[in-house]
Amino acid sequence: EGGGSMAASGEGAPEGLCGPERQGAGGLALLGLAPSAPSCPHGPALLFVKTSQGKEEGRRFYACSACRDRKDCNFFQWEDEKVSETRLAAREEYNRNHQPSFTHRQNVERYKNFVLLPLSKRRFCQQCQRLLLPAEWEKHSDHQFLCDISTAQLKSPSQLLYPLENKKTNAQYLFAGRSCQFLLDLIIDLGFRRVLSVGTPRLHEMIQSKASQEDFRVRSLLLDIDFRYSQFYTEDEFCHYNMFNHYFFGGEAARETCRKFLYQGSGERVIMVTDPPFGGLVEALASSFKKLMAMWKETEKEGHNLEMPVFWIFPYFFESRILEFFPSFSMMDYQVDYDNHALYKHGKTGRRQSPVRIFTNLTPSMIVLPVEEGYRFCAVCQRYVSSGNQHCEICNSCTSKDGRRWKHCVLCKKCVKPSWFHCNNCNCCALQNHTCEKTDAVCFVCGKAGHKRSTCPSLSHT
Ligand code: SAH
Ligand code: ZN
Ligand code: ZN
Ligand code: ZN
Ligand code: ZN
């Protein structure tokens, strides 16, 4: 697999948040979830193929759906490989041994016991990322731990747990309080009563911690691959889930929990909110989300021809990829900010604008963005746009994707980034210091050769 250079090279394509997709310079394409796929500890593996110049080449193989780094899960199998009975048995054993040491049920029991302890006996092992019961202290005696774990701390596990920082596999970027509050207020104003939180532990936790308030009626179910959360939530509040292959680690019971949650009894409207790792595999995510949407639809007794409302939080430069799978979605201008990502913190000075946006199938005009942060309503486009986003009379839309004011190029017949100039060599707009030769590497966004992400033709369409 290629390094991070491709991903970071595109203008406005920020470093850090998005590792290279499998289809990076190394040229791997995802074929999807095959019915007879073998399993690794993370559920059914995905089928891939090596590509060169955008064309499929060579043998197809299965690899882990969740881990893009071989160090985290080294599962590999050629599609046409004959696997012996012995190896199959060994693999099953391996998969069993690589499940968490406590089950969710056990963790729920442990939590019940934990909260009965006096404050002075409530410890959290930082090394093992685990709440400790007094009988276990001994075993963790040379580990760092936190003492006096308060009820408030138990209610905000995303603060207690350290964010996973593995760039390739599971980098956790937690919402800044302001963005999280904005999302929740929006959800409430839109009249939703239930939130399926897929990979949004902080939103889930904000909802859960308000659930005890009398006038607060919103409920949330967290689906996430980070099993550490099972220490803090019951089986009705958290399902161990892999969003790249729609795999419920808790089996049919967990799936049923999700199904029940999606069932809208007595007009309790549901919305799904997801903030997946940006490392890519958009098609894998889209296929899982379609399955969750189908689950919602099955429970819809009235049989309306509706889609489950969704907020998919993702960088703007994936717009065309998301619309490919969800033509009913549109991208909102709201910039989602994060706490633990230096680049995307909303600072007073030298603010790097976050490239992360909300994609939704709700009517754009309903998504009211905060005027005090400079967003305004464009009457022509019938949606809120960022302050820098000017309505282009020629394109007849507010064309900026990144929040800066874009400019119209008559030769390209579209608006382009302010830093771009029309290059007669390339016959399109590009950065002034670009090299006119075509690159041999494949594009991070569309997987085709001949250009990089920064000049990908699929990005600038409307
Ligand atoms: N901004 C969100 C967190 C987003 S980080 C918030 O503050 O709530 C991405 C989240 O997706 C993390 O919680 C991570 O554990 C989860 N995740 C990563 N890979 C996943 C997978 N394969 N399946 C399900 N969840 C995953
Ligand atoms: Zn420990
Ligand atoms: Zn407009
Ligand atoms: Zn224009
Ligand atoms: Zn141009």
Image: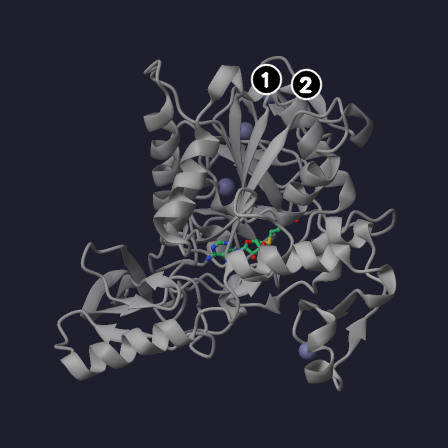
In the rendered image, residue 160, in percent from the top left (x then y), is placed at 74, 60
In the rendered image, residue 12, in percent from the top left (x then y), is placed at 61, 52
Does the image show residue 434?
A: no
Mark 2 surroundings: few (<14), some (14-19) or many (≥20) residues within 10 A: some
Under mark 2, the amino acid is Phe
Quarter of the N terminus within the rendering: bottom left
Q: Spatial distance from mark 2 to mark 1, Cα to Cα?
A: 8 Å
In the rendered image, residue 312, in percent from the top left (x then y), is placed at 52, 39
Question: Residue at image x 39%, y 44%?
Answer: 255
Question: Residue at image x 77%, y 43%?
Answer: 177
281 left or right of 158 in image: left
Say if mark 2 contacts mark 1, CB within 8 Å: yes
In the rendered image, residue 202, in percent from the top left (x then y), is placed at 67, 47
If the picture is divided into quarters, which one holds ligand 1?
bottom right
Image-quadrant location for residue 203: top right
Q: Is residue 104 above or below residue 264?
A: below
Question: Residue at image x 75%, y 22%?
Answer: 215
Residue under label 2, please give it.
377
Disc nearer the start of the sequence (2/1): 1
Q: Which numbered marker is on residue 365? A: 1
Image-quadrant location for residue 170: bottom right
Under mark 1, the amino acid is Ser
